[in-house]
């Protein structure tokens, strides 16, 4: 028996009994879309590999002097593309999710509701490996870069992929996920998940922190300490991701309701007792 | 602005019929849940730990010549304990799984090994033994094992938290010890760590920047490291309690029904 089934019962959820007069099942149990999950993750890893290749190939050759023409061509053009394309694509994605929302969500069958939970968490689980790899690799590339190169601009080759690609894409993914969850899952349609919202809002605080950080770095061009106090605010923003645990608990409580199976014998016994 | 938090307010009605029909299907469904949720949470929180660690204790973690006996064994375990403590609450409270700290530690080490190789070795050209991440899986296992045996956050903080801080330095000694070997450079005797530091110039090199133990006569004594380890142990108890409490708040499945 799963470990969860033993103890998630501490949550306040209502049991579900299969009625003896319920129609016989016509469809099999929902499946986790592992193929989709692996495919999406492969795409993310391919993009990450391309980004890291570009960074390794052109940081040292054309990325050290922001006054050079080559820097404008090889790096600033990417920066301008990122700050235009990511908000536009994110906005279109949000609009599409809203326009295609389920308008009769409360009549969603339990089978389809469970399938949606499977799809969301199956893809998230595998994609999390790519997300964490991307943020970790891009963050510490910045740490390594500033230890060996004195900055002459805020738009360094590592910043262009961390602050203006990795973090905005993570923002976009989280916001799209929030919209999807609150328009496709019945338990979130008439109310808002506080832990999920806090996690996203906290992570969004990376934006002001980036601005503050770059402002502070205008006072000194050598980034001597990575553990400097000016960087500590990033920690707060990242720490808010722990609130995703509360969101997971909310989902598990609902999934427990959806997956509750009671035998005919038990129903008859309960009926006899009452 | 009124903010209403109510776990049960306006809840979706219980499903009229089950999504699953047999105990076998239910067993497979919960197995799927196990396959999805625990890796997801461990990976995300492990990744957050890398982010947190880089920005607070990164310099001690990156460079061998930062790994002194006073600050590195004190700050590093205290910062690394925070997210495992947060995650421990949810894993134990809801799932009775005493594996949170170990999961985060393993995720952290894997992420760090990849990052150090790709970023510090391939990208910026440092030798791997110079930028090897610290190891704390053993301390995390001790913390989880204490919870498994005692089934108590209070005793786990007192015993497991203490040993988490205490064990950090001895567990990492095998990688640090060779760097403390003396080498003669010209007419000076310096440690291998400092010698390598001079070979790989960094912006974090100057003595006025490095936050490490000052060189005094006590430098030659052997008492600083165990004293620091015990201090780290005692502080870790407090850190564990505080962050388990934060974990209890972050894992609360609250809903908001009215914003304005």
Image (spheres, coloured by chain):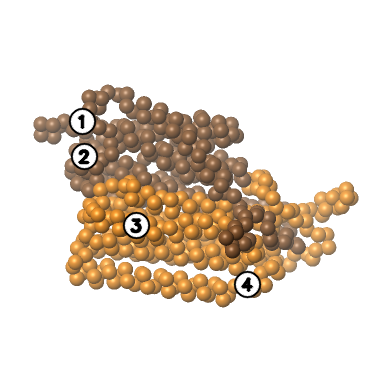
Cα distance, mark 3 to mark 1?
43 Å
Residue position marked by numbered label 2 in the rendering: B207
The residue at 42%/41% (across/down) is: B80
Cα distance, mark 3 to mark 2?
27 Å
Residue A146's spot in the image, x, y percent?
26, 53
Residue position marked by numbered label 4 in the rendering: A102
Tell which circle, 3 or 4, labels the residue nearer the N-terminal end: 4
Cα distance, mark 3 to mark 4?
40 Å
Chain that bears disc 3: A
Q: Nearer the viewer, residue A84 or A192?
A: A192
Farthest left residue? B187
Residue A63's spot in the image, x, y percent?
23, 63
Between tags 3 and 1, which lies in front? 3
Between tags 2 and 1, which lies in front? 2
Does label 2 lie on the same chain as label 4? no
Q: Give chain A's shade.
A: orange
Chain that bears disc 1: B
* Mark 4 residue crowding within 10 angstroms, few (<14) / some (14–19) / many (20+): some
The residue at 27%/69% (across/down) is: A76
């Amino acid at each position: 028996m799963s470990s969860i089934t033993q103890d998630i019962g501490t949550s306040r959820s209502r049991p579900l009994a299969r009625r003896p007069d319920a129609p016989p099942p016509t469809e099999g149990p929902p499946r986790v879309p592992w193929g989709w999950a692996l495919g999406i993750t492969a795409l993310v890893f391919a993009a990450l590999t391309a980004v890291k290749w570009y960074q390794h190939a052109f940081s040292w050759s054309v990325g050290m002097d922001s006054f050079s023409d080559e820097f404008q061509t090889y790096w600033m053009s990417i920066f301008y593309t990122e700050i235009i394309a990511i908000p536009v694509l994110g906005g279109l994605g949000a609009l599409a999710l809203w326009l295609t929302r389920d308008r009769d969500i409360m009549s969603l069958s339990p089978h389809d509701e469970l399938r949606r939970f499977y799809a969301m968490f199956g893809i998230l689980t595998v994609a999390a490996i790519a997300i964490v790899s991307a943020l970790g690799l891009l963050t510490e590339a910045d740490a390594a870069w500033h230890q060996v190169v004195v900055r002459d601009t805020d738009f360094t080759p590592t910043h262009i992929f961390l602050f203006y690609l990795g973090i905005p894409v993570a923002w976009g993914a989280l916001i799209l996920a929030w919209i999807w969850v609150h328009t496709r899952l019945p338990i979130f349609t008439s109310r808002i998940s506080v832990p999920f919202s806090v996690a996203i809002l906290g992570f969004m605080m990376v934006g002001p922190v980036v601005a503050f950080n770059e402002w502070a770095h205008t006072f000194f061009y050598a980034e001597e300490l990575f553990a400097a106090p000016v960087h500590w605010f990033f920690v707060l923003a990242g720490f808010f991701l722990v609130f995703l645990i509360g969101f997971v608990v909310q989902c598990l409580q609902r999934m427990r309701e959806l997956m509750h199976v009671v035998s005919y014998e038990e129903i008859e016994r309960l009926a006899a007792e009452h | 602005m009124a903010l209403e938090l109510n776990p049960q307010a306006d809840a979706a009605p219980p499903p009229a019929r089950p999504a699953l029909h047999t105990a076998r299907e239910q067993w497979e469904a919960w197995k799927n849940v196990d396959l999805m949720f625990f890796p997801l949470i461990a990976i995300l929180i492990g990744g957050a730990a890398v982010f947190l660690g880089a920005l607070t204790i990164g310099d001690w973690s990156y460079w061998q010549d930062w790994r002194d006996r006073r600050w590195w064994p004190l700050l590093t375990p205290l910062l690394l304990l925070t997210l495992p403590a947060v995650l421990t609450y949810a894993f134990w409270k809801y799932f009775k799984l005493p594996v949170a700290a170990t999961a985060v530690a393993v995720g952290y080490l894997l992420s760090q090994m990849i990052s150090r190789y790709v970023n510090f070795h391939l990208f910026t050209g440092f030798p791997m033994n110079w930028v090897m991440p610290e190891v704390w899986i053993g301390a995390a296992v001790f913390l989880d094992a204490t919870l498994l045996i005692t089934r108590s956050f209070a005793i786990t903080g007192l015993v497991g938290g203490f040993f988490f801080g205490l064990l950090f330095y001895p567990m990492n000694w095998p990688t640090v010890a060779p760097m403390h070997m003396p080498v003669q450079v010209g007419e000076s005797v310096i440690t291998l760590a400092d010698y390598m530091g001079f070979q790989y110039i960094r912006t974090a090199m100057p003595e006025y920047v490095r936050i490490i133990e000052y060189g005094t006569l006590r430098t030659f004594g052997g008492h600083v490291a165990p004293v620091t380890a015990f201090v780290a142990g005692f502080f870790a108890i407090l850190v564990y309690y505080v962050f388990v409490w934060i974990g209890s708040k972050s894992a609360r499945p609250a809903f908001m029904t009215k914003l304005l």
